[in-house]
Image (cartoon, grey):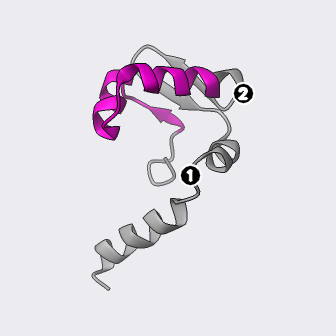
Amino acid sequence: MERAGDRRIPLTQEQLSTMMGVRRSYVSRVLQSSKAKSVVDTGRAKQIVEDLDRLESLACGCKASVRTLYNELLTGT
């Protein structure tokens, strides 16, 4: 999202579940819980992040590790 500059994620719940290796029903439950907390909104074949800071605080906390690895892969260091 940060690189794309867009809060919309143009993927279905089925596509998200496939990418994450989980069942679609799990993605649906997480999205509905996040929607109830006003963190995301959902629509047909799209998910919209309403509160990125809150989403990050609810996530696993591994964003920094993923970002570091991604930057290392891009720069070859």
Which quarter of the figure has residue 39?
A: top right
Q: Is residue 60 above or below residue 28?
A: below
Q: Residue at x 37, y 22 (%)?
A: 24
Q: Position of residue 55 (x, y in %)?
A: 63, 42
Which amino acid, mark 1?
Cys
Q: Is residue 72 above or below residue 63?
A: below
User: Alpha-carbon neighbours of circle 2 within 10 Å: few (<14), some, or many (≥20)?
Assistant: some
Q: Is 70 situated left or right of 58 in this image?
A: left
Q: Position of residue 38 (x, y in %)?
A: 71, 27
Q: Quadrant of the C terminus?
A: bottom left
Residue in the foreground of this view, choosing between 74 and 13? 13
Q: Which residue is mark 2?
A: 37
Which amino acid, mark 2?
Lys
**Mark 1 secondary-structure assignment:** loop
Q: Residue at x 38, y 71 (%)?
A: 69
Q: Residue at x 35, y 77 (%)?
A: 72
Of marks 1 and 2, the one in the foreground = 1
Q: Is residue 38 above or below residue 74?
A: above
Q: Which residue is mark 1?
A: 60
Q: Position of residue 34 (x, y in %)?
A: 63, 28
Residue in the foreground of this view, choosing between 57 and 76? 57
Where does the magenta region start and end? 7-34
Which quarter of the figure has residue 12?
A: top left
Residue in the foreground of this view, choosing between 57 and 10? 57
The number of discs equals 2
Query: In the image, is residue 17 part of the stretch drawn in magenta?
Result: yes
